Each structure stands twice: as structure tokens, then as C-alpha cells.
Amino acid sequence: MNLKFLASLLTIALFTINLQAQMPHVHYSGAMNAMGNTYDYNMWLDSIPNKSHLFGMGPYDKMKGEITVVDGTPYFATAFVEGSYEVGESWDIRAPFFVYAHVDQWKSFNIKGNFKSVQDIQDMVAKIAMANGYDTDQPFPFRIKGTFDGLTAHIVTPRNPDVEGFREGIKSQKFSFEGTKGELIGFYSDHHQGIYTHHDSFVHIHFLKKDKSFMGHLDAIETQGQTFTLYLPKKD
């Protein structure tokens, strides 16, 4: 093995280490496509050892609602009654699948433009990440804060009659908001479709109102000419 070849291997190794070090590791337990009809638990949130600066999401319990952890605060939302929802806080909750990462520092980017779909958000996040030297081959969390002209989010509801909140034929409730302040919390990955993103998307996004009165899975968005702040994990 000659010195030139060894130097090439070393360069590749250092480059790989640099890419791996640039963003916090994204962990997950369970998978969307493995929940089946029983929605068995794969994560008890209280078992996560380090909860400071934790960000994560997944279904609450056996599809009783949604979970979003924002900077170490665990929110769970339910919608057992037609037209209404409730949001609580607790670490003593479980999920059939859960994705999470610890992020103590973020880099902010001001963005202005139109969002007409979740796909638009996915494309924008990938574009800005790549333009700023992020390795989009690695999964990463992101946040978007601002005022949204209009958006729709859902909260899943139980599918089994032995689970609290079950209603025949109802698998989720959708809620729409106009001119509302809050943030989108998401995970981007082009390698985990069917695991923690849907099979036709590279993102899983939840919406949390600024006053913390609502939280749910983002379905649709339409906003024009607004200025938002995108946050990506600060690279090491």
C-alpha cells in the first residue's frame, strides 16, 4: 500500500468524521410501518437519560394523540371530543414510535416567501441546509418560527375500542388556524421514509402554537409574503 493511497484514505476518513460531527445524532425507536394494529409501545419518554434541550415527536400512547418535545418540555395532545382538543405536559408517556435529538445550539436563517404545502417547507429546508454546508445525507431536526396565514394540523385518535378516547370510524381530528403565531418543529431525512417520515415525504412536522394551547401534526399550510426564522442545529 503506497503513501499516496494511504493519504487518500486518511482524507476520506477525516472528511467522514467531519460530516458526522457537524450535527447532533438523531435517534429513533419503533417505526411507522411497524405499528400494525396493536400500536405496541417502543418508547417510554421518561427513559431518555438526558432531557435537557431535547426535541422529539411521535404518536401518544396507543394512538391517543400526538407528542412533541420542544427544548426539554414534553407536550402531548388529545382530541377525544368532536371539535375540541387538550394539551398537557408530562414525561410519563409512551409512544409506538419516537424520533428525537438533543440540540443545545441553533443557527438561525431569516427567510421570506410563500408556503403552499408541506412539500414547499421540505424543499426550502433542504435548499438552505445544502447552501450552508450541511450534509443532508444525515437526518436532522429543524424549527421554523413566525406568523402563519393559514395551516391545518391533525391529532390522531385511538383505533382500538379498548383504548381511552376511541370513537367508531374516527382516526384523527383536523384543526385549522388563521393568522396564528407559533413554530413548526420537524425532522428531515431522505433515508427514513416509513420509519419516522411518511412514505412520500422526507419530513415529519408538528405545529405548536406560541401560547402552547394547541399542538398537532402539520397537514397543510398556506402563507404568503411572511418573514420566518428557520433554525438548523449549529454545526460543531
Image (cartoon, rainbow, N blue to C red):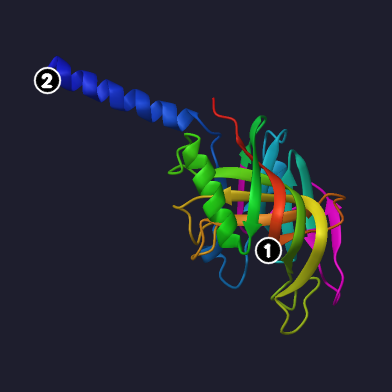
Q: Quadrant of residue 35?
A: bottom right
Q: What residue occupies the far bottom of the structure in this picture?
A: 169
Q: Nearer the viewer, residue 201 or 115?
A: 115
On screen, residue 183 above or below 200: above
Which of marks 2 and 1 precedes in the sequence?
2
The image quadrant that residue 160 belongs to is bottom right
- Residue at figure coordinates x 63%, y 50% from the top left: 186
In the rendered image, which residue does mark 2 sit on? 1
Kindly identify the residue that appears in the image at 16 percent across and 18 percent down.
4
| Residue 116: mark in rendering | none
Of residues 83 and 164, which is closer to you in this image? 83
Judge left or right: residue 214 versus residue 29. Answer: right
Amino acid at the residue labelled 2 = Met
The type of residue carrying mark 1 is Ile
Q: Secondary structure at mark 2?
A: loop
Seen in the picture, residue 9 relative to 193 is either above or below; the reply is above
Q: From the image, state whether disc 1 or disc 2 is nearer to you.
A: 1
Looking at this view, name the residue that lies furthest to the left: 1
Is residue 196 visible to the viewer in this orientation of the structure?
Answer: no
Give the residue displayed 55% in from the left and 29% down from the top.
Answer: 235
Q: Secondary structure at mark 1?
A: strand
What residue is pinned by disc 1? 221
Residue 197 vs residue 178, the one in the foreground: 178
Q: Is residue 116 left or right of residue 10?
A: right
Q: Position of residue 221 (x, y in %)?
A: 68, 63
Q: Position of residue 130 (x, y in %)?
A: 47, 41
Question: Is the C terminus in the top left, top right, bottom left or bottom right quadrant?
Answer: top right
The magenta segment: 77-100
Q: Position of residue 102 (x, y in %)?
A: 64, 36
